[in-house]
Amino acid sequence: MLFRASKETGNMRAVHSSFRSSAFLVAAILLGSMLLQPEADAIPAFARKYGLPCSACHEAWPKLNNFGQTFKDNGYQLGNDRDAPIWQQPTYWPIALRMTPNWHREGADHMAVYDPATDSIINQGITTHGFDLSGMDMLTAGTLAKNISFLLVPSADNEGAFHFESASVRFSNLLKTSWLNAKVGKFELDNMVSEKRIMTLSNNGGLFQLYHFLPAGDYQASGDPNFVGFGLGDNQLGVEVSGHSKNDYTRYSVAVLSSNDGNVNLPTSRGYDTYLTFSQAFNAGSMGLQRVGAYAYVGQAPTIFLTDGVNVIPGAGTGNEKFYRTGFFGMWYLKKLDFTTMFMHGSESAYLYSGTPAGQTLPLGAQAPKWNGGWVETHYTVNPQLIILQRYEVIRMSQQGNSANASNYGDMDSLTFGYRYYPFMTSRAGFAFHNEYSRVRQRGTSPIPGLDLTTSSVFLGFDFIF
């Protein structure tokens, strides 16, 4: 049985397409921090085990410095006797717990709301606010034996439903060289600009919009359960081969991943994706360590779904069509001020965009969507207890998936700013008072045809890890 998008015409198709796009965007933003509390590699157990302050690995929790990145790339090893898993001390506890009680306000303008007084749909803004909880992470990591390490992160949403955010084993220094390491399981992609150590937490700002962007009107954003989606910031299932110089200035990775966005039980097809990264750091003296890099993700997703006559057979998707994301980044330091620059070019098959089975005739006007995006994120470390942060993201369509769409349909702008204040940070626990504002605008995607959709978040949280 072939699965295709429903045939709609005229204004009704435009309204439905706009509503699907905006509903997906609003749902993703509202569920973002509630369900996908970022996993953090900040594990106080490491500080306790090695007798080091947390600042040895972190510029500001959870952001890693180069020493912390090197420790991670070495398989959570320092090369001394304390690496052994049998080494203990009275203060050592190998598990960390992270959660963020918070108050937040969410707003969205130009929403379609039913008015019983006039028996019609009206244009109205919606605002909600109140006290809430984030999800919770249980983090444990370390060595199983020399050069064999692990990371396990059972994670729950704010209603207590658990899943495995990460579960991987890493084999370090194969053939006795740091240039050959292997990791298998579910793990974060080797993104130097890590969404799992993101410094922002609100529903709008707690993710990189660019990592999860799909063009407005994309069938994969329609909510159909057969499409598992894709996010460059999502943890994936597969195997990764990586290597680095002794000082970690030069790094590379090659990963082969199941084409299911990290979902278990092989829900989509028998396809595989590939992710490649390379980065180079250089020391600029008193200014700090600078790093530049490039990345490319080439993936595929099914467009035809076999059924038993009624239900889709899990994992039996065929007619795979390709998509890709590629770009480069820079991490720049000017003493207390650092900023990250990111660029991405993305595209996908017209069959994926329109929900058309491979080999079938495309709808009139359907074409492969293409877009470019990027961001600049700045951090100013006033002192070890206070960091001020800001990020501005921009995404622009260079080719629409439907030639009838306006050239700027789905273009996105996102602004986030705030600060984190750390009253204390010890080898036993960490605590941050986090204030943030974030706003996202996407062109033409309101349920009210022809209007932009703007959502905003205000977040006041108490972020703690123990």
Image: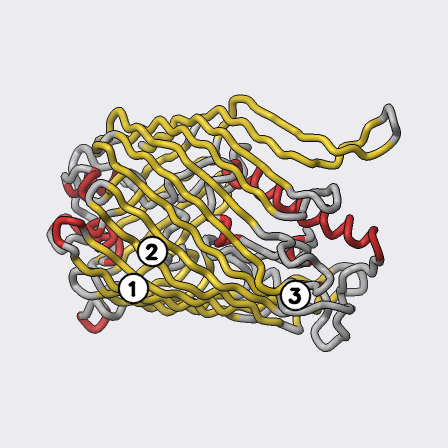
Q: Quadrant of residue 79?
A: bottom left
Looking at marks 3 and 2 on the same chain, the residue that comes earlier in the sequence is marked by 2
Q: Quadrant of residue 319?
A: bottom right
- Residue at 17% across, 49% down: 287
- The amino acid pointed to by label 2 is Met
Residue at which label 1 appears: 279
Q: Nearer the viewer, residue 75 or 213?
A: 213
| Marks 3 and 1 in Cβ contact (< 8 Å) | no
Residue at which label 3 appears: 352
In the rendered view, tell whether residue 278 sits above or below residue 410.
below
Residue reaching furthest to the front: 407
Asked if residue 121 lies left or right of residue 401, the reply is: right
Q: Quadrant of the C terminus?
A: top left
| Marks 1 and 2 in Cβ contact (< 8 Å) | yes
Q: x, y (%) of residue 460?
A: 44, 26
Residue count near mark 1 (Cα–Cα under 10 Å), binned few <14, some 14–19, many ≥20: many
- Residue at 35% across, 30% down: 464
Mark 1 to mark 2 CA distance (whole Å): 8 Å
Looking at marks 3 and 1 on the same chain, the residue that comes earlier in the sequence is marked by 1
Q: x, y (%) of residue 200?
A: 41, 38
Q: Quadrant of residue 432?
A: top left
- The amino acid pointed to by label 1 is Ser
Q: Nearer the viewer, residue 79 or 11?
A: 11
Q: Which mark is residue 60?
A: none
